[in-house]
Amino acid sequence: MTASVQGSICAAVMLVAIFVFVIMLIRTKKRLPAGDSAIGNLRRDELEAGGVRRELERLMVDIETMCREVTARLDTKIRVLNELIMEADGKIAQLKRVSAKSAPEKPADSPAAKAEESAPPEKPPETQTESIESDPRFKRIFEMADAGADLVAISRETGTPKGEIKLILDLRNRRQ
């Protein structure tokens, strides 16, 4: 085949392809309802997608707000529980001191006397401040607070809830 024959065949094939494409386009337009076009369909789809996107964004904002509220409630409950635990520990120490003062003398060779001798002495409440400040779990919290970091930054850095951090810092400040 010569180049001119090949060129003619290519041109004929392209004309047939264009003709088929135009016929398909005409048939597609006939199937669409009156007043509706492919461009109209695209715009309607875009508007629907935009509405869905706005609705999803609104739902995400609602979920974030709800999460913040639940987190705040949980932090408050944790703080209250920790305060109650500290108060209960103080009451237990007081009861042990009072019961030790009012307990009758026990014979030195009795099992109860031996158990008391082998038990470590109770720390008075005044030394609890030292144990709070020397506790390695709270060291980073105290360092960041002393450096001027706020509760949110400390919470983010240490992974400790804000309510618990507030309680720890309040206990340290109250004892000082």
Image (tube, helix red, strand yellow):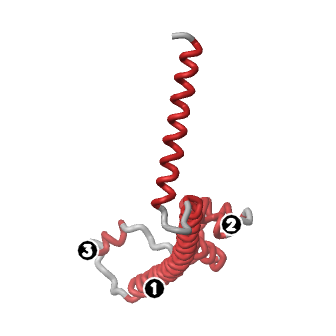
Residue at horizontal 49 percent and vertical 41 percent from the top:
20
Q: Viewer-nearest of labels 3 and 2? A: 2
Residue 4 placement, left or right of 146: left
Where does label 3 land, which residue? 110
Q: Give how far across and how far down residue 65 sits, in percent.
A: 56, 76
Relative to 32, is 99 above or below? below
Query: Which kind of residue does numbered mark 3 sit on?
Result: Ser
Residue 145 — which label? 2
Query: Which kind of residue does numbered mark 2 sit on?
Result: Ala
Residue at horizontal 35 percent and vertical 72 percent from the top:
116
Q: Viewer-nearest of labels 2 and 1? A: 2
Q: Nearer the viewer, residue 60 or 41?
A: 41
Crowd class of label 2 (few under 14; some 14 to 19; many from 20; radius 10 Å): some
Residue 122 makes an appearance in the image: yes
Where does label 1 land, which residue? 91
Q: Nearer the viewer, residue 90 or 12?
A: 12
Relative to 166, is 40 above or below? above
